């Protein structure tokens, strides 16, 4: 029973910390575009440019 006096406040603090980290990540734009970087890798243009011609 005495362990509950420690575990309940500890779990509330842990839940608050996790919520605060999730809130910060959402506000910082961490979840804005999840697929864009993956698509940019696949759509990479590998053709040489006209100014790269050897002389």
Image (cartoon, rainbow, N blue to C red):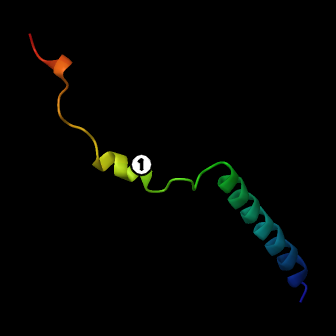
User: In the rendered view, does 29 fall on the left or right side of 53?
Assistant: right
Q: Is residue 41 left or right of residue 32?
A: left
Quadrant holding the N terminus: bottom right
Residue extending furthest bottom?
A: 1
Q: State the residue position of label 1.
A: 37
Q: Position of residue 31 (x, y in %)?
A: 57, 56
Q: Which residue does the image show at 48% across and 56% down from the upper left?
A: 34
- In this view, the residue in front, 27 or 22, is 27
Which residue appears at 76% of the width and 59% of the height? 20
Image vertical order of residue 55 relative to residue 44, above or below: above
Residue at position x 71%, y 53% from top? 24
Give how far across and how far down residue 14 sits, in percent: 77, 68
Residue at image point 20% right, 25% down:
49
Q: Dot 1: few (<14), some (14–19), or many (≥20) neighbours within 10 Å?
A: few
Local SS, label 1: helix
Which image quadrant: the C terminus? Answer: top left
Relative placement, left or right, of 24 versus 51 is right
């Amino acid at each position: 029973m005495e362990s509950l006096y420690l575990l309940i406040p500890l779990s509330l603090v842990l839940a608050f910390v996790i919520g605060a980290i999730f809130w910060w990540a959402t506000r910082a734009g961490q979840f804005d575009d999840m697929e864009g970087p993956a698509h940019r890798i696949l759509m990479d243009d590998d053709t040489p440019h006209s100014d790269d011609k050897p002389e």
